[in-house]
Amino acid sequence: MRLKHMAAIIGVSYGTLAILPVFVGDVRFIMNILIMCVIWAVVASCWDVMMGFAGIFSFGQVAFFVIGAYCSGILASSHHITPVVSILIAGLFTAGMGVLVGLPCLKLAGPYVALVTFGVHMALKPTLRGEIGIALGSGGSLGLLTIPPINIFGYQFSSTNIVPTFYLALLLSLACVLVIMFVIKSYWGIAFLALKDSQDFSMSLGVSAFKYKLMVFALTSFLTGIIGAFYGHFYGVLSPRMLDLDLFSTLMVMMLIGGLGLFPGSILGAFIVMAGSELMAPLGAYRAVTMGALVVILVLALPNGVMGLFLKRSASRVPTG
Amino acid sequence: MNLTEDNILFLYEMADVIIAGLTTGSVYALMAVGMTLVYGVTKAFNFAYGDFFNMGGYFAWILIVGLGVQFGGYLTILAIVMPIMFVVGYGLEKLMVAPLRKRADWENKVMMLTLGLALFLTSLYSVVFGVRLKSLPPIVDGMVEVGQLAFTYQDIMIFVMSLGGILLFGWLLNNTRIGMAVQAVAQNPEGAKIVGIPQARIFAATFAISTVMVGFGGILLSQKWFINPMSGSTIMIKAWVVTAFGGMGSIRGGLYAAFIIGMLEAFVGWMFGMSYSIIALFILLLATLALRPQGLMGKGK
């Protein structure tokens, strides 16, 4: 997909969201959902860059999100660092963790990468709940309960003034998404694709698999960490239960609905799934059942997601396109 | 020998830990063999593996507690549940995995699909059976005492039955037509096709056999521990670590790895507490993969 089209899709979807508070700005519940939309859009896009573009089958994205959120939360609540700084530190810390996780993955292939990254995900929960986590200040199985909201020059972005908070989230999310877009369209992105399509061949042409794969880990975990830290400060509460399979598969549904490896797709996917999941709220306990069934059906029936449908239409209209 | 009382107690404690390690190790071996078989033959990775473990447990629970089946004890249960597990596995492969095989990146798609299936089954169990733990009666009650050591018949039965399961499986693989066909497909899919082995059916059968094995493991362990609807992912990750540690696709590697990991878990649990066992597993796995990316006994590229 061309840069022009990507930018157009991102512009239209974020523009629509930016207008919405004019109509629903005083409904706290809807504003909360909108903020979640822009947050998940970034996480799903990062995951998509990892899986769809770089072809690294990583299952660690939720873990990085939680690491970022906890890092910033602990820094702000136990060490009294102002949230904007702590968010940056959390991003860098998560990027470091990403590189650490990425290092063993470089030598491995397919299911092994998935295992190592999912192992990080699985080991994170007992770590946060156990003595190590409590010593670091994670609050054990209760989680962090009092994370201070973001405060810029004395102005508090909390859920009491939710419209400005929403615009802050929107800007942050847009910035992350634009970074992803330019990276994909730059030399880096082409290197990612080349490595995914044929690692041996692209290495013989001088593309360093080592360098670019680590870069993918660093970049995606940095962005995920930052947005995770923002989530923590916005929500005010973090618990190790975020690592349950629930959020994990919701994000995966977002990616699948959007279309794997079709970049702005996962943003659309995030918006669609957030809206759909609110519509499914009356299902109660059956929501997770439906979500699971949805993953199965989507993989079978809609291989390229919404973007796939979109591309098919535009391809049939302009055959040379 | 002049052993002090403390030393003797310590030895007994060690013996207990080793027994625990052997028991869980034997069930892990059962599960790892099933998983490594599917991966070795069909190259499909099944994320819902742990939920089939629970499925076995729940079927047994329905029969014993729900329907009150008394006749023949666990033999009847196995005779009923194992065919059901086979049918479930066969049907799932035909319905869900086989259609994906034609696609270019089907291995990743299968992982995603089975992950969705895992979420579906986990949440279905907690909706249908509730989140409370279910327990099964022990296969055989009572214990045998050797000196001051006490072995429960339950542990012995688990050990014997899972080893029996593995041996039976090994015999089937080497001595029956379908077993040999499975091996042929694993060694050379194209060659197997040329000599007329129905590949699609072998894939489905392999998937089904692994479902049966993990379901068997589920019945065996559920009557020692409990059936927990949420435990699927933990079980899956353990079977996966065992498989990767032993080398994916290598049955013998899986067997060794299962006992090593069962022992490791028992010792770490005894020394530091159970919650550290998964962290220890993970560190062991990372160290192994850093030195031998293909696992203990896996074939290199």
Image (spheres, coloured by chain):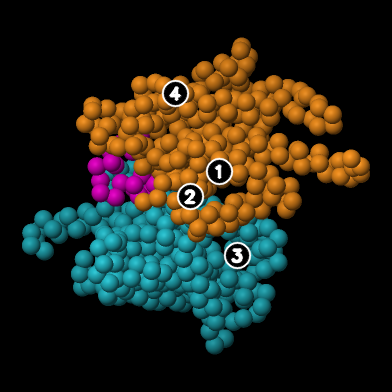
Chain colours: A cyan, B orange
Q: CA distance from mark 2 to mark 3?
A: 40 Å
Residue that numbered label 3 is attached to: A237
Q: Looking at numbered disc 2 in the image, what kind of residue is underneath it?
A: Gly
Q: Looking at numbered disc 3 in the image, what kind of residue is underneath it?
A: Val
Instruction: Report the magenta residues as a range.
Output: B93-112
Residue that numbered label 2 is attached to: B295
| Pointer 4 and pointer 3 on the same chain | no
Q: Position of residue B264 (x, y in %)?
A: 65, 47
Residue that numbered label 1 is attached to: B257
- Alpha-carbon neighbours of circle 1 within 10 Å: few (<14), some, or many (≥20)? many
Q: CA distance from mark 3 to mark 1?
A: 40 Å
Chain bearing mark 1: B
Q: Position of residue A65 (x, y in %)?
A: 50, 64
Name the residue: 60% across, 34% down: B26
Magenta residue check for B95:
yes
Q: Nearer the viewer, mark 3 or mark 1?
A: 1
Name the residue: 45% across, 32% down: B210
Q: Quadrant of the N terminus of chain A?
A: bottom left
Q: Looking at numbered disc 1 in the image, what kind of residue is underneath it?
A: Ala
Q: Is residue A102 above or below residue B263?
A: below
Per the image, label 2 sits on a secondary structure element best described as loop
Per the image, label 4 sits on a secondary structure element best described as helix
Residue that numbered label 4 is attached to: B172
Q: Position of residue B275 (x, y in %)?
A: 67, 51
Disc 3 and disc 1 in contact, CB within 8 angstroms: no
| Pointer 3 and pointer 1 on the same chain | no
Q: Looking at this rendering, what residue extends furthest in the bottom direction?
A: A153
